Image (cartoon, rainbow, N blue to C red):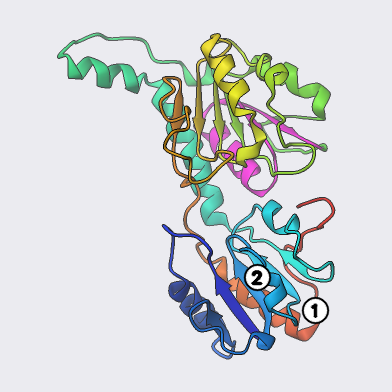
Amino acid sequence: MALLIEIGMSGWMSEQDLADQVRAAMPEADVRISTNIGNPEDITMMAVVSLQGDRPSEFVNLQLVQKLGAGVETIVKHPGLPDHVRVTRLKPDAPAREIAEWFLAYILRAQRNMDKHDADQAISTWSPVEPRYTPDTVVGVLGLGHIGSRSAGMLRDVGFQVKGWSRSPKQIEGVDCRHGYDALPELLGECDFVCCILPSTAETVGLFDAKLLSAMKSGAQLLNAGRGDLIDEPALMTALDAGQFDRAVLDVVSEEPLPSDNPLWSHPKVVITPHVSGWHLGDALKDVAENYRRLSAGEPLLHEVDRDRGY
């Protein structure tokens, strides 16, 4: 039984660093990386950011794919992943906190008119302008799972009026929680900022189409740190051009890396960050080691995904 760590992307931690951290949590584990796989028949578990090409077919004894993160849509939809292979994800606090901080950073930048003050400094102009008053500002959080609940709580504690939305009923102290699609347009019309942290499922792909974007409050901002396929990007640019709302701040997009000729880069009302809102795993690699142990012992796995539901 062996665990293969294969990141499948550049610009993040190295496979060797991740393997060393898993070994530190479980020294007896047989942990391998993509440059030193050894006998493919030994591989019973993979830990990946994304599942590449026809990789599953190369490991005939594969039993589990562990996502090194939360979003599993590309794994559960992978056409080459056999039905018997189980999928798990991570629910670490470190990136959940960082994503909440990302939302907060861009909201506060708008609250305090930072762009205007930067522009004024560039032309040596002293031009005071009133910032928004936080207790009067309404922030919506779409998706109230592990990360969304963390974001809603942080924004609430700063002093914003926070309204949450989810597919099914949720309760968070100090947060006005609503659920179901029918409640979404009204909620959007009440929010000065809308923070999206929804998973990619059959119900959420393209959720923000022209109709739903038209429900946004005038002057509002849409922030997305969930999945890139949540938003119809041409419809988004059309809505921004029409002045239906003020700005979109996107940490995720439909195609990553975003091609250099994509018009989102140059749109004056779009801010792009390169999928960096939640970066660190903290101690979550202990859960990877624990799932390795549980798989070998035949015990229930941590954070197992329902492959039919997609989360």
Residue at 37 percent across and 10 percent down: it is 130
Mark 1 nearby-residue class (10 Å; few <14, some 14–19, many ≥20): few
Locate the N terminus and report the quarter of the image it occupies. bottom right
Q: Mark 1 falls on what kind of element?
A: loop
**Place of residue 259 in the rendered image (x, y in percent of width and height, measured from the top left):** 46, 40
Q: Which mark is residue 55?
A: 2
Tell me the kind of residue under disc 2.
Answer: Arg
Residue 164 is a magenta residue: yes
Viewed as shown, does residue 68 lie left or right of 113? right
- Say above or below: 164 vs 5: above
Of residues 270 and 186, which is closer to you in this image? 270
**What range of the chain is rendered magenta?**
140-167
For the point 54% across and 33% down, which residue is it? 155
Numbered disc 2: secondary structure: helix
Q: In this view, does 96 lie above or below 169?
A: below
Q: Is tag 2's residue or tag 1's residue first in the polypeptide sequence?
A: 2
Relative to residue 179, is residue 291 drawn left or right? Answer: left
Identify the residue shown where x is 52% and y is 76%.
34
Residue 138 showing in the rendered view = no
Q: Is residue 174 magenta?
A: no
Q: Which mark is residue 299?
A: 1
Residue pictured at 64% horizontal, 28% vertical: 232
